[in-house]
Image (cartoon, grey):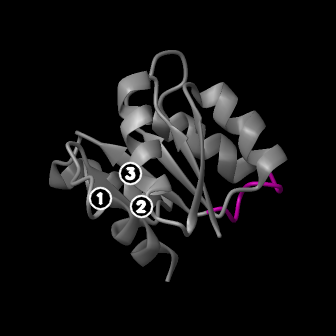
């Protein structure tokens, strides 16, 4: 079972991601809608992967990611950004920070689970 934490301030997109992944019997999904919630839930739940939106109010995705890296309990959890910011320089910056990868919004709901599994291989 792959435990995936999805972090996005857009509740509608979170619902779509949750539905897409839970259609695949290999996934257990937990959705939160802020960077602060992501920090708390990731430490407590210990997901196998964190899917992180880039643009969020208060604490954006990159800031959330840096804080995850600073915590010994979450620093080794792979993070994949799910974002509309997919210009080459944006993607390169995220990969340099240590992200496992980037999935662009809008994403293909039918291939989302497969894409995520590929990042875990």
3 and 2 marks in contact (CB < 8 Å): no
Q: Residue 46 placed where, x, y %?
A: 76, 55
Residue extending furthest top? 58
Residue at the (48%, 29%) spot, across then down: 60
Pointer 3 with pointer 1, Cβ within 8 A: no
Asked if residue 46 lies left or right of residue 83, the reply is right
The residue depicted at 78 percent of the width and 49 percent of the height is 45
Q: Earlier in the sequence, mark 3 or mark 1?
A: 3
Quick check: 23 left or right of 88?
right
Crowd rating for badge 3 (residues with CA inside 10 Å; few <14, some 14–19, many 20+): some
On the rendered structure, is 39 left or right of 93? right
Residue under label 2, please give it: 96
**Residue stretch rendered in magenta on the structure:** 71-77
Dots 2 and 1: beta carbons under 8 Å?
A: yes
Mark number, residue 121: none
Q: Secondary structure at mark 2?
A: helix
Residue 10 visible (yes or no): no
Report the Cα–Cα distance between label 2 and label 1. 6 Å
Distance between mark 3 and mark 1 Cα atoms: 27 Å
What residue does disc 1 label? 92
Q: Which residue is mark 3?
A: 20
Q: Residue furthest bottom?
A: 121
Query: Label 2: how many residues lie within 10 Å, few (<14), some (14-19) or many (20+)?
Result: few
- Whether residue 73 appears in magenta in the rendering, the answer is yes
Determine if the magenta segment contains residue 81.
no
Q: For this rendering, which residue is in front, 82 or 75?
A: 82
């Amino acid at each position: 079972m792959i435990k995936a934490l999805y972090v996005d301030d857009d509740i509608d997109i979170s619902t779509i991601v949750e539905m897409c992944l839970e259609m695949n019997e290999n996934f257990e999904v937990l959705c939160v809608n802020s960077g602060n919630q992501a920090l708390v839930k990731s430490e407590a739940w210990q997901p196998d992967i964190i899917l992180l939106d880039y643009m969020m109010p208060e604490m954006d995705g990159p800031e959330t990611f840096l804080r995850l890296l600073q915590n010994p309990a979450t620093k080794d959890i792979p993070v994949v950004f799910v974002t509309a910011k997919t210009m080459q320089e944006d993607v390169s910056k995220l990969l340099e920070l240590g992200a496992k990868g980037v999935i662009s919004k809008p994403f293909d709901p039918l291939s989302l689970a497969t894409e995520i599994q590929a990042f875990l291989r």
